[in-house]
Image (cartoon, rainbow, N blue to C red):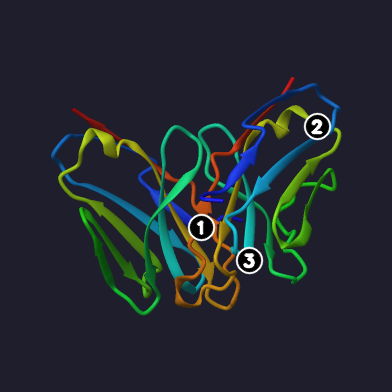
Amino acid sequence: GAGVSQSPSNKVTEKGKDVELRCDPISGHTALYWYRQSLGQGLEFLIYFQGNSAPDKSGLPSDRFSAERTGGSVSTLTIQRTQQEDSAVYLCASSITGTALSGANVLTFGAGSRLTVL
Amino acid sequence: SQQGEEDPQALSIQEGENATMNCSYKTSINNLQWYRQNSGRGLVHLILIRSNEREKHSGRLRVTLDTSKKSSSLLITASRAADTASYFCATVHGSSNTGKLIFGQGTTLQVKP
């Protein structure tokens, strides 16, 4: 597609429920990133996929969080047993490659999925 | 942990004035990027500066990089009300060949008409 597409744009859920957030990156981009942004805060790195390599999951805050990327394209971020502190905007981004060489790691962001846990 | 830290956290200026934002980082880097965010949603890439570059320009934007001080600055000249947004720096660890970007906390810029 022309840009990074995220769905849903807004999600309200009850504490304890599971949620799935979807990201459709730019076609041909091999690297995909998930970040979380709480109100008025900076971006917190969650997870990073690069081609067929094992993902870098070092930013996932707990084992309730998981993500997968199927066929090197669409990615789903799953939050199990949601808590109120999970409320945030979840941002997905993609880049042409996952290397910093030649500046190929310039990110294109989606509009984000705003999650509210009641 | 965050790699980049922006300073100031918030900046308010009049239209036409220049705005300067600073970013400090902790470890060596491959490149440093600046992004802009409107209305708390997606970020937009502004400019990238490589570790072997000292200054770069793009329109009204000027970015400098001082690797000895581990710092960068973003200057917006002749600011406009439409420049009101949050600005973030992002870096990649120099020892890593990945593109994994770590963002700072951001500077919120308000340009008053």
Measured in 3D between alpha carbons, the distance from the residue under mark 2 to the one under mark 1, in whole angstroms, is: 28 Å
Using residue B103 as the reference point, say whether residue A24 is left or right of it: right
Q: Nearer the viewer, residue B110 or B38?
A: B38
Using the image, name the chain to which the residue with label 2 belongs.
A
Measured in 3D between alpha carbons, the distance from the residue under mark 3 to the one under mark 2, in whole angstroms, is: 29 Å
What's under tag 1, amino acid-wise? Leu
Using the image, name the chain to which the residue with label 1 belongs.
A
State whether discs 3 and 2 lie on one chain: yes
Q: Which mark is residue A107?
A: 1
How many badges with numbers are in the image?
3
Q: Position of residue A15 (x, y in %)?
A: 81, 24
Question: Are the residues flagged by discs 2 and 1 in contact, CB closer than 8 Å?
Answer: no
Q: Which mark is residue A30?
A: 3
User: Going from the N terminus, do you reach mark 3 or mark 2 first?
Assistant: 3
Residue at 56% across, 55% down? B2
What's under tag 2, amino acid-wise? Thr
Using residue B15 as the reference point, say whether residue A20 is left or right of it: right
User: Going from the N terminus, do you reach mark 3 or mark 1 first?
Assistant: 3
Using the image, name the chain to which the residue with label 3 belongs.
A
Q: Secondary structure at mark 3?
A: loop
State whether discs 2 and 1 lie on one chain: yes
Q: Residues within 10 Å of mark 3 (few under 14, many from 20)?
A: some
Q: Is residue B60 above or below residue B79?
A: below
Q: Position of residue B70 (x, y in %)?
A: 40, 68
